[in-house]
Image (tube, rainbow, N blue to C red):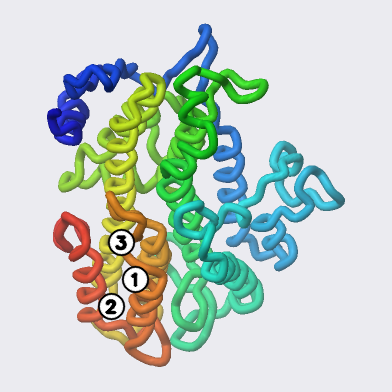
């Protein structure tokens, strides 16, 4: 039998519309030009739950910069404990208030990484609550105070104003970039694209017989793959052709676009989209070998997005540090970049090495990197050294197929 991995990569590269390994036991696959799949002339694609959680995350992210906000309200945007339209209606969007979903329930909640690791999951969920609470208790009272080492407050970043804690970290960036990993990436790579979810119970037999879910037009396996797709493309104006407007949300979608815009990585957006599309086509064709190969491609490429941006922000932060390290008013651009980098480093623990059940960086390794980032002095990012940022960048790039120079520019 031919090496189907090589063959399907050729399909992706050349844009062919079918994939076969010349083995009659594996059906040929016809792949549409867009992410459009139908049964009886009706769409089988559905990921409304993912769109809902992205919108909830967006509202939480924007609300973290509203100095009129309270801890209780911000935590409710994260927890949605009155889900379904209870006494409180935390969201501006009535549809979100009516939803029984929440951001917190899917943070560090993948089947592969956290179903048997609830202790770590609980710590991660609590990290976001701590950052939210600290934004209100530490940063909000110092809205009009100039930030400096050990002093939370505001600091200029070009034409923008940022607000940092005593260590120079922006809590809002930690939350937003942390959710890229803890919610979007973890659910995509370690839950919905996992055979443990795709093939759960009778999913294979039902997909083979095209037995649809109760009251739906899709099989359960089709839907699980689409839910992974939804965490990446759930807010695109044309979700069937999402590369036309990358940056539709503040999470992984935005940064696929940013990495695609770097000439060193041009083409990665299409690789991701084609893998999603071919994998879904393989499910329709009942060709689970090709499906699983596409899932592995997605694990590699989406993990790369996070790692590339982590290195990018370490290097951009290094270049933005002022020559005079006592000129605290000039730290704004560097602190902003490094706060974004902190969130992307945090997200590395939710990446997935292809062919394994392991992240590229464990929770322990991530915490070691974050301690290193803040460990050059008692004032965190205010004291960070160029060599530390280079060391962290090299450690991250060393586990991937790119260089610090490629990612850092």
Between the C-alphas of marks 3 and 1, the distance is 26 Å
Residue at the top extreme, as displayed: 41
List x then y, in percent, for residue 219: 53, 24
Q: Are marks 2 and 1 in contact (CB under 8 Å)?
A: yes
Q: Residue at x 18, y 24 (%)?
A: 21
List x then y, in percent, for residue 78: 65, 57
Residue identified by numbered label 1: 334
On the rendered image, what quadrant is the N terminus found in?
top left
Residue at the right extreme, as displayed: 87
Which of the two labelled residues, at mark 3 and mark 1, occupies the earlier sequence position?
1
Between the C-alphas of marks 2 and 1, the distance is 8 Å
Q: Can you tell which of label 2 and label 1 is closer to the viewer?
A: 1
Nearest the camera: 158 or 182? 182
Which of the two labelled residues, at mark 2 and mark 1, occupies the earlier sequence position?
2
Q: Residues within 10 Å of mark 2 (few under 14, many from 20)?
A: some
Q: Secondary structure at mark 2?
A: loop
Residue at the bottom extreme, as displayed: 378
Q: Residue at x 36, y 79 (%)?
A: 368
Q: Residues within 10 Å of mark 3 (few under 14, many from 20)?
A: many
Q: Which mark is residue 360?
A: 3
Judge from the rendering whether residue 82 lies leftward or rightward of residue 187; answer left or right: right
Q: Can you tell which of label 3 and label 2 is closer to the viewer?
A: 3
Is residue 353 shown above or below 396? above
Q: Residues within 10 Å of mark 1 (few under 14, many from 20)?
A: many
List x then y, in percent, for residue 107: 55, 57
Q: Can you tell which of label 3 and label 1 is closer to the viewer?
A: 3
């Amino acid at each position: 039998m031919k090496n189907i991995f090589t063959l399907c990569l050729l399909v992706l590269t050349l844009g062919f519309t079918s994939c076969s390994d010349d083995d009659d036991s594996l059906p040929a696959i016809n792949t549409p030009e867009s992410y459009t799949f139908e049964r009886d002339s009706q769409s089988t694609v559905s990921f409304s739950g993912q769109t809902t959680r992205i919108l909830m995350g967006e509202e939480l992210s924007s609300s973290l910069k509203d100095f009129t906000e309270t801890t209780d309200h911000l935590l409710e945007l994260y927890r949605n404990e009155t889900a379904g339209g209870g006494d409180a209606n935390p969201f501006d969007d009535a549809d979100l208030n009516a939803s029984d979903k929440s951001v917190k329930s899917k943070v560090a909640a993948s089947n592969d990484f956290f179903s048997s690791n609830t202790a770590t999951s609980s710590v991660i969920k609590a990290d976001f609550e701590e950052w939210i609470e600290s934004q209100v208790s530490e940063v909000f009272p110092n809205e009009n105070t100039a930030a400096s080492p050990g002093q939370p407050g505001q600091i200029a970043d070009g034409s923008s104003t940022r607000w940092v804690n005593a260590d120079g970290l922006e809590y809002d960036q930690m939350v937003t970039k942390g959710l890229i990993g803890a919610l979007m990436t973890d659910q995509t790579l370690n839950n919905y694209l996992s055979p443990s979810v795709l093939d759960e119970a009778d999913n294979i037999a039902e997909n083979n017989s095209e037995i649809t879910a109760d009251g739906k037009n899709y099989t359960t396996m089709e839907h699980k793959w689409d839910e992974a797709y939804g965490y990446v493309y759930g807010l695109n104006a044309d979700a069937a052709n999402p590369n036309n407007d990358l940056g539709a949300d503040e999470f992984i979608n935005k940064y696929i676009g940013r990495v695609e815009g770097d000439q060193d990585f041009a083409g990665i957006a299409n690789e991701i989209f084609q893998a999603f599309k071919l994998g879904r086509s393989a499910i329709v064709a009942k060709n689970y070998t090709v499906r699983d190969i596409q899932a592995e491609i997605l694990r590699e490429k989406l993990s790369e997005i996070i790692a590339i941006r982590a290195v990018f922000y370490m290097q951009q932060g290094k270049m933005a540090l002022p020559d005079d390290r006592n000129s605290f008013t000039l730290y704004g651009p560097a602190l902003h970049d490094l706060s974004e980098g902190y969130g992307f480093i945090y997200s590395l623990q939710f990446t997935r090495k292809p062919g394994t059940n392991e992240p590229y960086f464990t929770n322990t390794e991530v915490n070691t990197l974050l301690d290193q980032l803040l460990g050059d002095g008692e004032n965190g990012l205010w004291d960070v050294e160029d060599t530390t940022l280079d060391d962290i960048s090299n450690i991250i790039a060393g586990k991937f197929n790119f260089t610090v120079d490629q990612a850092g520019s």
